[in-house]
Amino acid sequence: MSDRGKKIFLLLTVVVPFLIYCVVYYIPMFRNAPFKLKEFESIDFKWGMGNNLENSYNSATGDYQYVNGQDSLIKTNVKLRKDDILYLHSKASELGFWNFPDVLANKGTNLDSSKVLRYVMQFNYKKKSKTVIYLTDYTETPKLQGLAEQMRTILQQSINDAEERYGKQAGSKN
């Protein structure tokens, strides 16, 4: 067999089947991805001790309420920019948020009576939503705990940055 014939044979037996496999396997995954940015509607983020989730943020309405250091309930309206939403969506994808279990709590934890700080992170899309309840005392899978903590930090930081931006804009208008 000539050198050219060997290259053609190699191409037809290795490269072409691999490309076909990639197309057949990955295209439907991307096409049917359940959490697409273009279908994004809102983020709901709540936190508090036990079942008392007095701190909350809803990106659709911009309603943000939290208890400050003096135990006063602060209610304000904070809107996330499209860049913020894109960032949060991409970080959720990067951290594997869509694959998190619905509840991150140690085995045997009674969710109704637990007085541990908990976070409820919910991404809403047109066709479905993903909600994760994360209790801060979770220790069963350290890597998953770290990823959940990262997601919580990113959400909280984005909201705080948006509130700070909004405060500066409101201050400059006066």
Image (cartoon, rainbow, N blue to C red):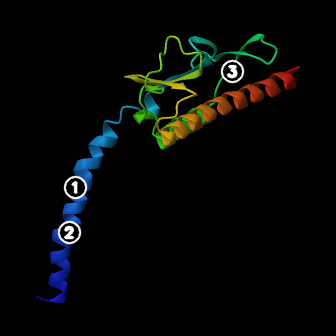
- The amino acid marked with disc number 2 is Val
Q: Which of the two labelled residues, at mark 1 and mark 3, occupies the earlier sequence position?
A: 1
The C terminus - image quarter: top right
Q: In the visual, does 99 lie left or right of 88?
A: left
**Residue in the image at 66% along x and 23% along y:** 79
Circle 2: element type: helix
In depth, the one of 132 and 33 nearer the eye is: 132
Q: Quadrant location of residue 32?
A: top left
Q: Residues within 10 Å of mark 3 (few under 14, many from 20)?
A: many
Badge number at residue 21: 1
Report which residue position mark 2 lands on: 14
Residue 68, quarter of picture: top right
Q: Residue furthest front?
A: 108
Q: Residues within 10 Å of mark 1 (few under 14, many from 20)?
A: few
Which quadrant would the N terminus be assigned to in this image? bottom left
State which quadrant residue 61 falls in: top right
Q: Which residue is mark 3?
A: 78
Q: Label 2 near label 3: C-beta < 8 Å?
A: no
Q: Is residue 7 visible?
A: yes
* C-alpha span from label 1 to label 2: 11 Å
Could you tell me which residue is drawn at 81 percent across and 22 percent down?
A: 170
The disc labelled 1 sits on which kind of residue? Tyr
In three-dimensional space, the C-alpha distance between marks 3 and 2, rounded to whole angstroms, equals 54 Å
The answer to whether 6 appears left or right of 47 in the picture is left
Q: CA distance from mark 1 to mark 3?
A: 46 Å
